[in-house]
Amino acid sequence: MINDYISDAIEIISKNDRGGYTIPTSKLYPYQWNWDSAFTALGLSTFNRWRAWIEISTLLDGQWNNGMLPNIIFRQNDPDYFPGPEEWLSKTEPPSSGHSQPPVLASVVWQLVRRGTRYDIDRAQKVFGSLLNYHRWFIEARDPNKTGVLSVIHPWESGRDNSPEWDDAMDNISINNTLKGYNRRDTSHVADNQRPTKKQYDRFMTIVYFGRDNNWDDKTIFDNGPFLVADPGVHFIMLRANRDLLSLATQLGRKDDAIEVKAWIQHLENGAQKLWNPEIKSFCARDMRTGRFSGGVSSASLLCFYADIGTEEQKSSMSDHCQRIFKACKYGVPSWDPENNEFDSKRYWRGPVWSVVNYLVYRGFKSAGLNSFAEKIRHDTLRLFEISGAAEYYDPNTAEGLGGSDFTWTAAIYLELSKSRIPTQLIKHF
Ligand code: GLC
């Protein structure tokens, strides 16, 4: 049985392979996505390390000269997806979107090296400079005033597109008057009640057009863009990615680079306190235009353990939140607090469980020694796949598979979390 699930997962990833890069799923997401590809490389590495490194290298093909790694790389024009390359006008080759996504890539590279051989070390040497440039860009472009906290300029940059974290900031956006009756494609592939609303989409597009009309100039977007919110997800993922990049720099003997990365870590450690909301006793997002907190506990709040952030008191309060949240639904981790009014068990990032976030939360629990939480999350993640297949996300109460199906990163995380059980005959040697 287990072997069947593992073969299914491998088959899904192979089916979504477009020759050197993997799409998240056909129709709904027909291009290469940033953090999807990083997680895909992790899953691939469990059975084909050669192909895993190719995924990383095609992702880095999309890197801009300033170091930015876009959230989508468009290698062809696909009518199934909106907004495509002609809406973003990146003027890059290959064309891409104009902002980034959670920077998990360095952590994936470190994982590959940690459990790999000389082969992986050689490949890591080749990509190290690009990872460093990517992090430098992120820290400079998304915190130019050196406050120590990282913001996102679009909800899509957070990877958690319609999370209630962004609701207040989104309400303050005036819709671009030139926005014509554009044609969303996502709702022709997935039921409306599982996707963002029209009101949200109008604002998503308003932010895209602001960036495009300002030639994706980071400074203008940061200072005057319609949306600027400090994101615990991106902040904690970048902090951990820097810790992993530091381990990599040390392993590769890059002393000067290690000094630069250490300074970033210190800076982000200090800044993390700006995300602590004393009212709800949790880390959460904060609108940088108004200073207001989002006011709810999301799955990204729990990534404080992954980043190793918080005083003893804060950690204990976060662990109480976990206990409460895990009791309130059957499968963890819901993307939004089930006891909060905005919770919606089927709508995208407003409640459903996502395997990739589960993986990061699981790693965080492990490093913090919260072993029973870690085991619960690992177990739930595997079960959801076994019950409902490789769905894009799942209902935390019923395990129903939602959104796209045959989803690459869900399959990749299944492989990563069942690693020790992958039969040797399925592993490709080279
Ligand atoms: C959605 C998700 C985003 C993901 C993308 C492709 O936009 O919100 O995090 O990268 O789909 O799977």
Image: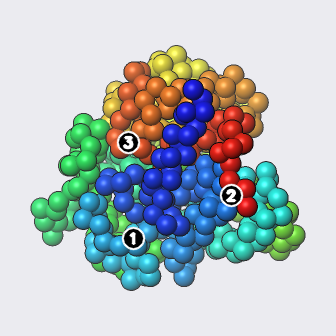
Image x and y of residue 301, in percent: 55, 39
Q: Quadrant of residue 122?
A: bottom right
Residue type, mark 2 in image: Arg
Pick whichever, 384 or 177, lies toward us: 384
Q: Which residue is mark 1?
A: 74
Q: Quadrant of residue 404?
A: top left
Q: Is residue 306 left or right of residue 171?
A: right
Q: Which mark is residue 423?
A: none
Q: Is residue 330 visible?
A: yes
Q: Which mark is residue 49?
A: 2
Mark 1: secondary structure: loop
Image x and y of residue 276, in percent: 57, 41
Q: Is residue 249 visible?
A: no
Image quarter hosting the N terminus: top right
| Neighbourhood count class around disc 3 (C-alpha, 10 Å): few under 14, some 14–19, many 20 upward | many
Tell whether label 3 touches label 1 (CB within 8 Å). Answer: no
Image x and y of residue 428, in percent: 68, 53
Judging from the image, the colouring scheme is rainbow
Q: Quadrant of residue 422?
A: top right
Distance between mark 2 and mark 3 Cα atoms: 25 Å
Q: Which residue is mark 3?
A: 405
Residue 267 vs 394, above or below: the answer is below
- Tell me which label, 1 or 3, sits earlier in the chain: 1
Pick whichever, 284 or 125, lies toward us: 125
| Neighbourhood count class around disc 2 (C-alpha, 10 Å): few under 14, some 14–19, many 20 upward | many
Identified at 34% across, 41% down, the residue is 403
